[in-house]
Image: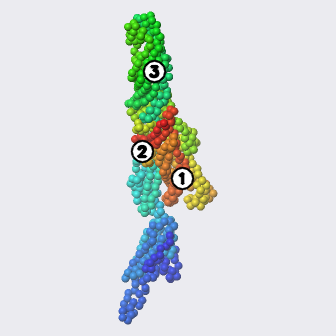
Amino acid sequence: MTPRTTASILLILGMASACTGETEPDKNTGATDDIVDDGGGDGADGGDGADGGDGGDEVDPLATTLALTVDNANPAVGDTVQLTVTVLDQDGEQFVGAPVSIGISPDTGTTYGAGLLTVNAEGVYEVTATIADTELSDTVTVTADGSGPWITIDSPARGIWHDTGAEVTVSGNVSDNISGVAELTLNGSLLEVGDDGSFSTTFLPEDGAHRITLDAVDGVGNASDLILGGMAGAASNADTWVFDGIIAHLGQGGLDAMGEILLAEVTPALIESALIANNPLVSGSTSCATYNVRASDFDYDNPVVSLTPQAGTVLLTLEFDDMDLGLAGSANVCGVSRTINGGLTDSHTTIEVVMSFAVPFPGGPAVTVDSTTVTFTDLQVDVGTLSSTLSTFGLTLADLGINFETLVATEVEAFIPAAIEPTVEDALRAITFNQSFDLLGSSLDMQGRLSSLRVDTAGMSIGLFGITAGPDPIDAAPELPGTLVLDDELPTWSSAEDMELGLHTDVVNNVLYRATMAGALNLEINATDLGLEPAVIESIFPGATTLELSFAPTLPPVIQPGDSESGMVLMIPGLQAEAWGEVDGLLTRLAMAYVQVEAGVTIVADGSAVQLEFTDLQSIVDVTPVDPSGIAAAEVLEETLEAVAGGLMGDLLPQLAIDMPPLGDIALIPTGGAAGGTANTWIVITADVDN
């Protein structure tokens, strides 16, 4: 700091000694400074008006008041403070020449000379100016306090995983021996601090990663903080299958696509083979006739299949035009033999099938045809010469007990379950999820295996077990209870969407957990990697000539509900960071810090996949000093490490690309995504059928 120049009417300490040739004494000797007022005169030849007189009636000036001021009462360590003493006489005029003494208490931590006080250490300094042999004195307080209060914490420990619904006790001590503690807050709420600096309170964290932030402010406005990352909630082993962790919901467009799959399977040839396999269609005898009728061929035009979701069931409707069922056989009517060549035709035929669903074992869908209805528009029967022969003897087909409309309907109803049930089951079984990731340097897999089937008027929900796999944990993997479980209700599905793919964050978090256990967040970086020169290292860590940083997780990362555009955030609640370097040739731990990372989760459609991008990354670092003298340095170091950690995490955190699973042979094109469920614990991706 450059000393400020005072006005000529002010008395600057040290001026008198300079004028009289006296040497400025050392600060802590109790020495006296002779103070000379350079603006008040000496009172000689005061004059009596007309003849100038000799001023014999004048009174000699006498110092009556003394005022001490400083140009900066709150300097930083290393600053120089200018002291100014103003002495006035009984007439209020400046008095020059009074011997002024300067005393400073305590007598260590500052250097004084020529009216300048240099602060070498933090502290509260009482600076007193006095005039010898008088009662005149004045005292000012110079407070050098560049650090916030010192916060220590007894509970909770760092990196702790709390049970669901368990209150967490936060207790410790806060102190500031220089300026005192003005206030202490926990996550923004004011705390009561005891006379001895102790504090204790409780709070109930929500399930998921959370942050405990203690902010303290001292009497002159310096702030400091202590930040803990924690986790709360239930945990499960990453090897546990997450029931319905992945859900493929088929809206009307998706059901129509499944109908196309069924249409490709339920062909005229399939129906024909079923009918022929059940030949003869009808056979019998009366008192005058015997007969045997077989199906010979079957065909139709313009087939259409539709699937309509209902409450608990799906209505499958197969419609086609110009049905033609060939008939062949033989008959003997009262001794007259006839060959039957004919057929049944109908202009428009409708087959309605009501199906229900179950999953009796993982991966095994069970489809049950509850009912089948066949409706003919204008069924025509042609049995060739058999009709004329019957009429010759006064008989009709009805006399033979043959009702072809009922016969064909019965045959189709008998055939449908055997044809439809395995076909639909195969179509459902084909809806699987298999995804590989290269995440944070680790190769991981996420799979889906059928776990449930639900149907309502909005469509069909196909639940899949969420299964993850990855490399074995490294030896340095932390001891953690497992991966976080975040309960939530199912998302609300829309029948207007062709398909919606729901991924519960429990499954995604299993992938992140596996990557963590595989060492993805165990990082080491040196000064060369950071591009730091030795001079920069020494400015951050005095005395150090080298620098190596290491990061290791104390809690796993999670995706959870949060304030972001999508309603979800990625939290890395606990990374322990250590700084090591050579000091005087010895490898020394320079600092220990704890890092929390938060990033928004953005869901973006990209071609045939959806990207989960981690954006707006923020890293928060807490360096805990071992004593109050290190608070200011810790705050500076936190800013440095936040920049380093932010850069590292920004480079590490990739995009998670999730490919849309096809619906059988039908491709799906993603259109976007958002958080789902009442608690925003689902990643819901929407997709259109690629026509």
> Which residue, given by chain and number where applicable, does mark 3 sit on?
324
Q: Is residue 117 shown left or right of residue 314?
A: right
Indicate which label's residue lies in the foreground, 3 or 1: 3
Indicate which label's residue lies in the foreground, 2 or 3: 3
Give the amino acid type for the residue marked by disc 3 in the picture: Asp
Indicate which label's residue lies in the foreground, 2 or 1: 1
Which of the marked residues, 3 or 1, is nearer the chain's N terminus?
3
Which of the marked residues, 2 or 3, is nearer the chain's N terminus?
2
Alpha carbon separation for disc pair 3 and 1: 73 Å
Alpha carbon separation for disc pair 2 and 1: 29 Å
Quadrant in which residue 282 is drawn: top left
Q: Residue at x 47, y 46 (%)?
A: 602
Q: Residue at x 53, y 46 (%)?
A: 654
Of residue 540 and residue 520, the one placed in the foreground of this image is 520
Residue 85 appearing in the image: yes
Is residue 587 placed above or below 602 in the rendered structure? below
> Which residue, given by chain and number where applicable, does mark 1 sit on?
647
Give the amino acid type for the residue marked by disc 1 in the picture: Gly
Which of the marked residues, 2 or 1, is nearer the chain's N terminus?
2
Is residue 33 placed above or below 379 in the rendered structure? below
Of residue 674 and residue 94, the one placed in the foreground of this image is 674
> Which residue, given by chain and number where applicable, does mark 2 sit on?
206
Q: Sort mark 1 into few (<14), some (14-19) or many (20+) by Cα contacts within 10 Å.
A: some
Of residue 5 and residue 501, the one placed in the foreground of this image is 501
Is residue 387 placed above or below 547 in the rendered structure? above
